[in-house]
Amino acid sequence: MRAVRELSLAAPLLLVGLALFFGGGPADGSISWLGGLALLSILVLLAVRGLPGGALSVVPLAVLAAWCAVSIAWSWLPDRSWDYANRTTVYALAALLGLWAAARTRALAAGLALLLGAVIVWSLLGKVLPSLYDYGGPDVTRLRGPIGLWNQLALAADFGLLLALVFRKRFGVLLAYAALVALLLTYSRGGVITAVVVLAAWFLLSDDRLEGAACLIAAAIPAAVVVGIAFALPGITKNGQSTHVRWRDGLVFGIVLVAGAAVALALENRALLRNVRVVRWIGAAAVCAAIAAGIVVLVRGVGSGTVGNGGGRFASTSSNFRFTWWKEAWHGFTHHVLAGTGAGSFNLLNLLYRKSYLDFTIEPHDLPLQFLAELGVVGLVLLVVAMAVLLRRGIGRRGHELALALLLPAFLIHSLVDIDWDFAAVAIPAFVAAGAVAGRPGERRLSANVLLPATGVAILLAGAFFSPWLARRWANDALFTASSSHAITLANRAHSLDPLLLDPYWAKASALDASGKTQQAFDEYVAAVKRQPHNPDAWYFAGKYAWEQHCPYLAYDYLLPYTELNQNALGDGGDIYNAALKRVNHRQYRC
């Protein structure tokens, strides 16, 4: 019975831990096994514990996942829509798993705090010991490992800050200290703004304001000093540094980091920080400093150009193309009001409407606008309802449950300026916490007659999770195998598992071309165009192959739609198009 009881806590924490360390960023490879783990855990819990209280609160999120799946029918990127349906389903399963932990929310909060602390410490160790995390050379120094992107690591640090205020004492101070250092070294402006908003909400709603403020002050003072020293170390915060410099400064940073932790612990024991008047004065000074800094930044003006990856980002109000992407999303929505262009398809809207080759993106960096563009009004309404139902149960919570209830709002606030929905590392903790807060203690036992169809549904979902993953693996193997016949076999297998994917068409075409069957190879490229007629890559590969077969007219016929669907296209595609156009205008063609 104790093992059963612990499973309701261990299962969601295991899912969160794997997502934090191995979530894979915006790639979809991790979604299959994260979803499989969630399904297995849920089946076991259904069998031994029964249906958790509050299960209806997850239904709107499941309906949103179903709408993502339905959008495959009209999607501009149907294979990506399948992936997005899987991703949203996994988030619904994470919320469902959280329901079983409703009776043990304090233990869940402690587990989440430990996991977030581990991720934050590991990310900082990547600066102390450069060999622990590959930053892709010395060109980008923003803290991002192991989650993979700085903005999402900043959001994880925001989560850690909220939970630190709950536990306070030594553990809370150390967690807050590490989270603040990591947050500032990500240079994430959205992460800082989100932290300010959710911390303000916590202090407004909490009954433990004095203790929380003391914890935050004890952590913030040494964190500020440590970050200041980090900016003076080229190997930590400057691009283009040699491996020797990174190692030398990394070890110095490690010593400073440990010293800062010791200072934070020492400050935590100071009775001065328990004095209400002192805390109020420090808090007022911090607020005034923040307001002054905000005013200084605002007078620099607003733009939509690129911003460098250095600490100077904090002094810039440039949206880094976000205003442009938001306009593209809105433009796409106005042309597809009801149902959008399909879940996860904004990349093609970006290519269609962009004015510069520099502003490439896969999402508009704003969750409501993304769902408007990709899933239409219906998708946005479902998103709002799903979030509102999960958030409703968090109203009026205190203590550790307040911190848990604020994780999903922090996620949603940050997603107004970033692509958090594409990162399981931050989405899964938020939805697990939301599920735990929305749940109610007590389960309803299920009969075998109910468990059997539940198992069937789980098997179908597992098939939906793993089919695209396996299809991509087979398609990739087909592209690099030396045997043409084996490549065709692998491509056919991939196509049978995921008929929406274009890679099997291209892999099969390459194998047929190697076998001298040029017409059949070109037929595969044409089939890819018919599968995804809004995808410029499909037109590009067909046109490029026609050009290689010395058919400039046919190449022009396929590359013209490519240039129309991919505005400001540079490089090979545009060059071939111009060459083909020149040959066609001079009637220098064979086919």
Image (cartoon, helix red, strand yellow):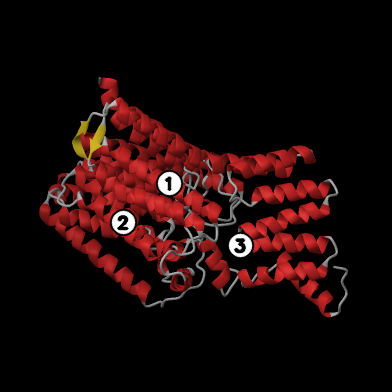
Secondary structure category for the residue under label 2: helix
Q: Which mark is residue 195?
A: 2
Find disc 1 in the rendering and name its residue: 424
In the rendered image, residue 510, in percent from the top left (x then y), is placed at 76, 49
* Residue at point 83%, 66% (across, down): 551
Q: Give amino acid for label 3.
A: Asn
What residue is shown at x 21% (from left), y 57% (from top)? 201
Determine the secondary structure under disc 1. helix
Q: Nearer the viewer, residue 169 or 8?
A: 8
Residue that mark 3 sits on = 535
Position of residue 244 measured from the top left corner of the image (x, y, whole percent): 60, 46
Q: Are marks 1 and 3 in contact (CB under 8 Å)?
A: no
Q: Earlier in the sequence, mark 3 or mark 2?
A: 2
- CA distance separating discs 3 and 2: 38 Å
Q: Position of residue 245 (x, y in %)?
A: 57, 49
Vertical relation: 208 (above or below) 571? above
Name which residue type carries label 2: Ala
Tell which tag, 1 or 2, sits nearer the viewer: 1
